[in-house]
């Protein structure tokens, strides 16, 4: 087992190096003078020279790459050109928004997708099966951002005066302020600068509300999260439902399932316990593969629902030419993506011995 | 030198022709047995017709504002959206006017062109590049294989949309650059697929026989390896077109793809999204257009996969 995990971690290293090269090249591939591209057209020659020297851009490329890697290893992603603050600080503030959204979307996709797939497979060729598959097909064909807009119109405008109404933008109702748990717990005195990790956790609104027993804000945060989570989660949901259905259908045709039925095992136990366990393996892979979709979905959804997460910040930074931020965020997202894929692979190896022995 | 006798060549060519045309007929028949594939094919055909005949179908110029045009009765959105589709009598503007007073119906109709263009071209480029890389990697093997496939791993390490966004950042916004960006994100899929096919048939007897006959690597690849690995690539490509269209719309929606006043569905959505609460129809129609298009390619691709995958055909 340890060998399998070690081998898997080792095989990620070339990819990580590749990511570093690509993101390093990002700044250098910008058309024209990097100084003009970063500082703008009005930068004078002296300012440019100082800038190049300060950032080591006057050194040979391999040396620059070395500096870049050293900085990243030390947790320094440079200063944002737009916010004039370290990129890491901005990341700590905004990543929780995306993580909260992604986890909620994934939960929605799994909790709804797997049961839908199971019922469709069990009632193969029934009206329910047909309906689910039509909806799943439409689900994967829908543009995420359009679904988000339509949902916010439906729940924000059409259902405005009904109990079903949901807020169409933001993370919390304006004026609501969830007091960070580290202040409530007295870990940090007001006015003092808290550690990055504390800020990170406190920005996960739902977790922070639970930690501080703040029921009112918790409900508000969840209500604000529902529409974005459905938006991001719909495509993964459709994929998970389809995968669960087809893989369960395959397993339900196996001999051992017939044997279990012949033994008189209850149908529910046959489907869930005997067949379900084996059919979930491909579903685990599909869930792993969906992280990319979720990140892409988050970029669009955050833009629609006015959430200041990583995705929206990244897009805004591209339009405002804040290249250090783009570079920093891209490298972190890509590395996170590799890490998640690695974890999924390792879990898959634990669940299915055939994988780790091959 | 291998010289074919006249008898052998004519008869064999005839036989081969019959066999290959039979295979295609068989494949088409197989595909048409799947209702989802038929529905997908119908949708795609209709969309292609719309794209070709856009000037005939569109009622107005898609980029001409109707404001101040004599004889115009259409009302700008923001007041009361007046749509014949919703029972309001405005025979001139089927889907109403957009915020700049342009006929939305004509814009959506013309939008078919750019979406299909991006879908087909980006996937064709990706298939071409991916197949060349994959076949080279699989056929040559060794270090070349290792280097190509590690590069593909790096490309796959970025979430697709994020990578496309980064590429467009470097190249600058625009539909063509978006097309290039999207195309690059798709290359690894086809490289992996074609490499796997090459590896699976490289050691087979008929390829070894070709080697023994002294056929050049190019000849072996083009005449024997590629035809044997084309099916999964076509299926994956059809499904890819749908995703590429979605990606292109997303990039345009973020302002990185098609630029105004070009009629492109994602672009139309991006223009009108701030007016969602007063004029939802401006957002509704282009979204539906994207959905139907992507659905068409997904249904056709799914049906084709079911029809052409021998593993599924066994039962």
Image: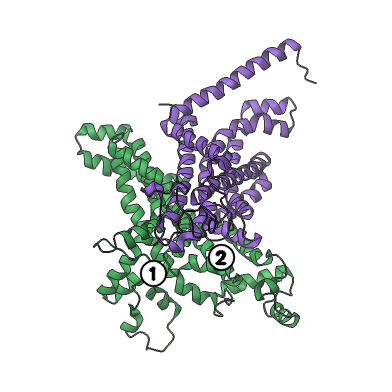
Q: Mark 1 falls within which chain?
A: A
- On whether disc 1 and disc 2 are found on a single subunit, the reply is yes
Residue sitting farthest toward the top? B7
Q: Which of the pair B28/B259 is nearer the observer?
A: B259
Return the chain for callout 2: A
Q: Which residue is mark 1?
A: A170
Q: Position of residue A250 (x, y in %)?
A: 36, 36
Residues at marks 1 and 2, CA–CA distance in whole angstroms: 27 Å
Q: Residue at x 56, y 24 (%)?
A: B24
Q: Nearer the viewer, residue B110 or A177?
A: B110
| Label 1: which secondary element | loop
Mark 1 or 2: the one toward you: 1
Residue pictured at 33% horizontal, 62% vertical: A157
The residue located at (42%, 88%) in the rendering is A192
- In depth, the one of A254 and A204 nearer the eye is A204
Q: Nearer the viewer, residue A321 or A268?
A: A321
Q: Identify whether A313 is placed above or below B186.
A: below
The colour applied to the residues of chain A in this rendering is green
Query: Could you tell me residue A75's position as x and y percent?
Result: 54, 74
The location of residue B42, given as percent across then percent down, is 47, 34
Seen in the image, is A145 located left or right of residue A256? right
Task: Classify residue B212 by image quadrant.
Answer: top right
Q: Earlier in the sequence, mark 1 or mark 2?
A: 1
What colour denotes chain B?
A: purple
The image shows residue B9, relative to residue A78, as above or below, that is above
Taking B44 as reference, is B201 left or right?
right
Q: Which residue is mark 2?
A: A331
């Amino acid at each position: 087992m340890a060998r399998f995990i070690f081998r898997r971690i080792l095989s990620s290293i070339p990819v990580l190096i590749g990511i570093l090269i690509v993101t390093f090249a990002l700044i250098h591939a910008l058309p024209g003078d990097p100084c003009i591209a970063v500082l703008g057209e009005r930068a004078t020659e002296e300012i440019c020279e100082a800038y190049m020297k300060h950032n080591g851009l006057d050194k040979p490329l391999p040396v620059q790459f070395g500096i870049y890697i050293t900085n990243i290893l030390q947790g320094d992603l440079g200063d944002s050109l737009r916010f004039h603050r370290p990129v890491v600080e901005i990341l700590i503030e905004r990543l929780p928004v995306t993580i909260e959204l992604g986890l909620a979307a994934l939960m929605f996709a799994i909790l709804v997708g797997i049961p839908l797939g199971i019922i469709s497979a069990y009632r193969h060729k029934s009206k329910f099966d047909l309906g689910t598959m039509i909806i799943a097909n439409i689900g994967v064909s829908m543009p995420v951002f359009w679904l988000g807009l339509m949902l916010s119109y439906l729940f924000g405008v059409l259902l405005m005066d009904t109990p079903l109404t949901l807020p169409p933008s933001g993370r919390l109702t304006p004026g609501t302020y969830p007091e960070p748990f580290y202040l409530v717990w007295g870990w940090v005195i007001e006015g003092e600068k808290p550690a990055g990790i504390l800020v990170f956790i406190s920005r996960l609104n739902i977790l922070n509300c639970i930690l501080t027993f703040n029921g009112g804000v918790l409900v508000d945060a969840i209500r604000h999260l529902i529409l974005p989570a459905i938006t991001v989660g719909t495509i993964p949901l459709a994929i998970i439902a389809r995968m669960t259905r087809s893989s369960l259908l395959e397993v339900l045709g196996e001999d051992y399932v017939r044997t279990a039925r012949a033994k008189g095992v209850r149908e529910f136990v046959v489907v869930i316990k005997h067949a379900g366990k084996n059919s979930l393996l491909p579903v685990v892979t599909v869930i792993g593969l969906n992280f990319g979709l979720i990140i892409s979905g988050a970029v669009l959804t955050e833009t629609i629902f006015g959430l200041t997460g990583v995705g929206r910040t990244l897009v805004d930074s591209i339009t405002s030419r804040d290249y250090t931020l783009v570079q920093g965020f891209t490298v972190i997202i890509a590395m996170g993506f590799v890490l998640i894929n690695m974890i999924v692979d390792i879990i898959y190896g634990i669940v299915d011995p055939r994988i780790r022995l091959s | 030198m291998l010289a074919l006798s006249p008898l052998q060549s004519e008869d064999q060519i005839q036989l081969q022709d019959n066999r290959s045309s039979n295979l295609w007929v068989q494949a088409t028949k197989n595909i048409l047995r799947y209702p989802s594939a038929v529905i997908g094919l119908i949708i795609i055909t209709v969309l292609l017709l719309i794209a070709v005949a856009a000037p005939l179908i569109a009622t107005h110029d898609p980029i001409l504002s109707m404001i101040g045009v004599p004889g115009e009765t259409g009302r700008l959105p923001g007041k009361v959206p007046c749509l014949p589709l919703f029972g309001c009598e405005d025979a001139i503007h089927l889907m109403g006017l957009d915020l700049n007073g342009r006929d939305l119906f004509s814009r959506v109709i013309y939008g078919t062109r750019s979406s299909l263009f991006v879908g087909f071209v980006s996937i064709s480029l990706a298939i071409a590049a991916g197949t060349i890389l994959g076949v080279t990697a699989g056929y040559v093997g060794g270090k070349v294989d290792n280097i190509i496939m590690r590069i593909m791993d790096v490309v796959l390490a970025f979430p697709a949309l994020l990578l496309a966004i980064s590429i467009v950042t470097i190249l600058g916004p625009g539909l063509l650059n978006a097309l290039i960006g999207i195309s690059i994100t798709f290359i690894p899929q086809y490289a992996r697929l074609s490499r796997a096919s090459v590896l699976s048939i490289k050691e087979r007897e008929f390829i070894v026989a070709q080697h023994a006959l002294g056929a050049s690597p190019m000849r072996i690849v083009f005449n024997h390896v590629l035809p044997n690995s084309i099916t999964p690539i076509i299926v994956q490509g059809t499904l890819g077109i749908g995703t590429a269209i979605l990606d292109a719309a997303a990039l345009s929606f973020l302002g990185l793809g098609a630029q105004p006043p070009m009629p492109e569905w994602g672009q139309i959505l991006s223009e009108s999204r701030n007016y969602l609460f007063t004029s939802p129809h401006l957002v509704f129609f282009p979204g539906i257009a994207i959905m139907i298009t992507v659905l068409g390619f997904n249904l056709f691709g799914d049906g084709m996969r079911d029809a052409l995958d021998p593993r599924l055909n066994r039962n």
